[in-house]
Image: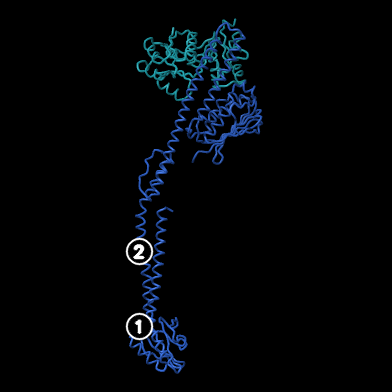
Amino acid sequence: MRLGAKLTALVVILVVCSALGVGLIAITISHRIELTSLEAPLRTVDAVGESSSTNALANVLDALQAANVDATAVVVGPQSKATTLLTSSPLFQGVLTVSDARESLRKISRSRDVGDAVYTSVDIGAGQYLVVLIGTASASRDEHELEWLTVVVALLLCALCILLSRRILRPDIAALQELEKYAGRVTAGDLTADSPERGGSGEIVQLRSEFLAMVAALQVRLQREVDVSSAMQQFVGDASHELRTPLTVIKGTNDLLLESSGLGAVEAERLASNAKEIDRMSRLIDDLLYLAKMGQLITEPMVLMNLSLVAREELRRFEPFFSQRKVTQIIDEDVMLQANESYVRRIISNAVSNIIGYTSETDPVVFRVTRSGDEVILVIEDGGPGLPRYDETPTRFQRFDAARNRAHGGSGLGLSIMHDATRRMGGAMTMSRSSLGGLALEFRFPGPPN
Amino acid sequence: MTTVLLVDDEPGVLAVLDEAMKRQGHQTLLAVNGADALDQARRLKPDLCIVDINLPVVSGFEFLERLRRDDQSTPVLLLSARDSEDDVTKGLRYGADDYVRKPFGVDELALRVAAILRRSSPNHHDDVVLRCGELSLNIDKHEVRRGDQVLELSATEFRLLEVLLERIGRVVTREQLLREVWNIDFDSETSVLDTYVSYLRKKVHDGEFAPITTVRGVGFKVVAPRLLS
């Protein structure tokens, strides 16, 4: 429910309740006062009847006549029929019994049986009573009319209040709506959106200024992050240049020496060994810079890609190395993934390179690309020796088999790169023992939005 | 004789480039900054420029852009120590003919230079043919012959023979072959290479004519027939 509607409903309830409450109390009080004024002549009747019981009938009638009271006077007795001595206008229509008369002796009474009237009776001897009644029908009618009037006034007040509350609340509601739109644009990433217009009550003005201050702080922070990122980018670029330049000189010189004529076998062997180490160093620098570059990005440039196609393409590259292996490919058609394609290719080629480098040429391999619920799953398993332990997160330069790793010329950063690249795309990599006996790498990524 | 202009602000790199080019029989011109390089390129008209991207004051890109304003034909090979894809695209867009990442192998550089010079030579419409005695490999026709006989080679076998013939008389390491033929950039104890070399020998060798030799523990070498005897 919107705030404006809520406030209007609240005002309406308050107005209706208070108008009806006050109106009805006023009506009740005025009705009481009217009844009291109607009862006054009856008190006179009681007083006259008490003072002279012998001549009560005549005295009462005289008193009524003298005061010009519009009343009905009826004589009732145990046997005799009621005799009407005076009639009022409007005509009294009710039925009176002797027990009614006895009960109202010198006392003002009302009874539903008798009708719309207040009455009192006076003993006039011989078991007979004079009952004097004054009609209350007009007072009741007035009361009903007033009740209706109250309801109508309440409704009119209600309409007026709705109009007024709308008018008073409009600037606040408009200011809040503006703020809401602005917040939406900020959430969508537009931190430089035009700030909402001024207006609204004190609290709303305060809320807006706090909100704008928050966005400004966010902007400063983001800018700082962008600065750090671009400084880092610059650093990685410079480091890349600084590390590779001396390596170029070493590699070039080594190559030139290796190709010189008249080289002894020992020298040639040493230079060839140097060449291998230089290549290893070069790969190490590549991998380190790749990791650094991944870490410096604030957001990954992700695109919608067909993982099935990319996986098949990458595997085709390595096909010559799989000629003696049993290779099982369970690749579902068109499994789509929101990802950085170069990361995905890197993950697959790293995993496959490891298999080629660290397992025997006949060890079986299984590739799986599937969709499961909201997730995209890539599994690469082998029947090689596996790892001595399966840590949750691979550490940098983790070497499970140092001697073999050196022979392979790996940087010791391959698993870290796969792990970090997966995490940066919102996925998770797990390592476990495969049912084939070797390493099972499982990559789970969130599926693309529908 | 061809003249190659070498531009790099690192004296060490420049020395390596200089020696590598001289060994290939080229004359060299040296420059350590973009402005000087531009001046030499305009005055001395080298046949090829090898230029580092990361130069002080006038960068390699700027050199290329300014050179291309009045010289569309001189081939330029860019060198870069950065591995940003953008650099490659930018370089090629500015009119570079090729791109080599640092650290480069002298061998690889020499091959690329030879390829660029072949393409830019006035008679580059002639087919490029690599030879070893009676064996010839025509790159453009994708055809291998031993004497008059055409040999049927698979795509991988052809590429393997091409890489070996390009470096005739020199050892090609296992890593180089894996990298250039299979695009695999790591050492591997795989037997794939040996398998393919054995296929190739079966098709290419004929009695006394057996130019593909194994250099134990290092790689393979194609030996010219006159050295065989």
Horizontal and vertical percent position of residue A293: 50, 28
Q: Are marks 1 and 2 in contact (CB under 8 Å)?
A: no
Query: Is residue B190 among the parts visible in the rendering?
Result: no
Q: Which chain is the one coloured blue?
A: A
Q: Which residue is mark 2?
A: A156
Horizontal and vertical percent position of residue A309: 52, 31
Q: Tell me the residue at 42%/37% (across/down).
A: A219
Q: Residues within 10 Å of mark 2 (few under 14, many from 20)?
A: few
Horizontal and vertical percent position of residue A408: 61, 22
Q: Which chain is the one coloured cyan?
A: B
Outermost residue toward the front in this view: A51
Name the secondary structure under disc 2.
helix
Q: Tell me the residue at 41%/56% (across/down).
A: A7
Q: Residues within 10 Å of mark 1 (few under 14, many from 20)?
A: few
Query: Is residue A41 among the parts visible in the rendering?
Result: yes
> How are the residues colored?
by chain
Q: Which residue type does callout 1 highlight?
A: Pro
Q: Which residue is mark 1?
A: A90
B131 vs A351, nearest the viewer = A351
Which chain is indicated by disc 2? A
B64 vs A229, nearest the viewer = A229
Where residue A167 sits, quadrant-wise, is bottom left
A430 vs A39, nearest the viewer = A39
